[in-house]
Amino acid sequence: MFLLIYITNPSKEAAQKLCDHLLEQKLIACANVFPIESAYWWQGSIAREGEYVSIVKTSPNHWEAVKTAVEKVHSYEVPCILKIEVEANEAYEQWIVNSVA
C-alpha cells in the first residue's frame, strides 16, 4: 500500500513548484500535475475557478511530513490536501518506498 495525496493549486507554476519542493525533500517519489475546473463554497458564495491538481505518491509514513510541508508553503488560506490509500503492482509500490527512503 502507498498514498496518493491530492492537492489543488492556483496555477501550473505553483503546482510544479510545490512538487519540486516535495521531491527535493525526498518526501514523495513522483507527482502528476493537470488542469481542472473547480466549483466550491467560499465565504458564503459559490466560486468557480481553474486550478491545477498535484497528485503526489509517497509511503504512508510520510503523510504527516508531506501535509506539514504543503501547509507551510501553500498560498491558499485553506489548502486541499487529501490522503488516498491505494495498492499497485508490487514493483511499483517498492519503487515508491525506495524513492522516499
Image: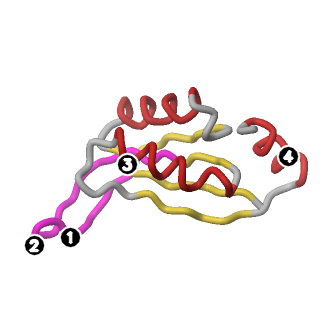
The magenta-colored residue range is 36-54
**Amino acid type indicated by mark 1:** Trp
Q: Which residue is mark 3?
A: 71
Question: Would you say the residues marked 1 and 3 are in contact, meaning their CB atoms lie under 8 Å apart?
Answer: no
Assign a secondary structure to mark 2: loop
Q: Nearer the viewer, mark 1 or mark 3?
A: 3
Asked which quadrant contains residue 30, the reply is top right
Residue 92 inside the magenta-drawn segment: no
Q: Position of residue 93 (x, y in %)?
A: 81, 50
If the image is split into quadrants, where does the C terminus sit?
top right
Q: Amino acid type of disc 3? A: Glu
Q: Which mark is in front, 2 or 4? A: 4
Q: CA distance from mark 2 to mark 4?
A: 45 Å
Give neighbour class at mark 3: few <14, some 14-19, many 20+ (Cα, 10 Å): some
Which labelled disc corresponds to residue 94?
4
Q: Is residue 16 left or right of residue 59?
A: left
